Amino acid sequence: MRNPHVVALHYRLETGPDLILKNPEPVEHKTQAFSVRLADGHLRAEIKDDPATVADAVGELTQYLRSWEILTNLCYGSGALKWRLEDAEVVGGPPGAGVSDVLRGFLVPNGRFTFGVGGPHTLTQYPALPHRFVASPVVMSLWQRYDDYLNERERLTQVAWWCITTIEWSSGGRPQTAKRYAISDHVLKELRRLANVGDERTARKRFVGQVLRERTAAEVAWMEAVIKRIILRVGEWAADSKAEWPKITMGDFPRL
């Protein structure tokens, strides 16, 4: 008897209370590993690889759905888009073999991927597909910390510091980061500086010459905008590291 393998997965699209989808037209996308069709809030993902490589195909599909979620939530806020796994089409194996037999280890608890919408926003089409955005491990790390901040589980200074040090560490330093992601060195320096601004409650650390003060509303808005843009750019670079992306400069953000 053949081992069971997945030929298709079925998901239900869930949105947060601040994102409203109003009669969107179906959307489709195909890769070498899978094809998806989303209509009436239901997504069917057909796994096109043979049984020997189904694990890789499911992994690629999982990353694609995560990319879609993060990209949507960067545009609209935290909690906008979720995928709930509802069913699997399985062939082979003993009678009754199902998703739990085939996908164990590929899914987070409850088959739910949640990444994070300020609004309310009404869309007449589904959120944009992640054609040029990939939820790489670095993107996942940055987004999770920022999502924690949006849900009041993390301080902005800590998130900013994690963001700047993560991309610099993964790139080999600030000059390499600026070049790799086409981000102005001025933007990187300013985010680093503001990550060290805070009062007795919010400061990331103490250091010689420090003046404790509360961050201004303009500084908070600037940091939020920059962190989101950096996450987006890291995902863009992961999708196409050879592309010449427009340089991110201070002029792209609110004035301090």
Image (cartoon, rainbow, N blue to C red):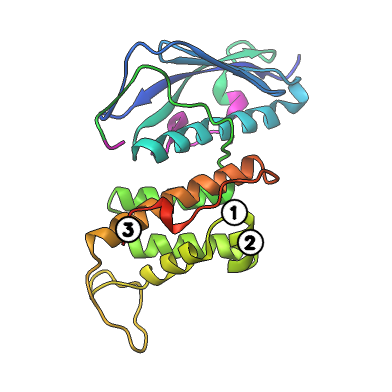
Residue in view at x 41 percent, y 29 percent: 82
Quarter containing the C terminus: bottom left
Q: Secondary structure at mark 2?
A: helix
Compute the Cα span from label 1 to label 3.
Answer: 22 Å
Label 1 – label 2 distance at C-alpha: 9 Å
- In the picture of the structure, the residue carrying the numbered disc 3 is 255
Q: Is residue 155 magenta?
A: no
Which residue is the site of mark 2? 171
Callout 3: 10 Å neighbours few (<14), some, many (20+)? few
SS label for mark 3: loop
Q: Which residues are magenta?
A: 101-118
Marks 1 & 2, CB-CB < 8 Å contact: yes
Residue denoted by label 1: 181
| Residue 159 visible in this rendered orientation of the protein | yes
For the residues marked 2 and 3, what is the alpha-carbon distance in whole angstroms?
Answer: 28 Å
Is residue 107 located in the magenta-colored stretch of the structure? yes
Amino acid type of the residue that numbered disc 2 sits on in the rendered structure = Ser
Q: Position of residue 182 (x, y in %)?
A: 58, 54
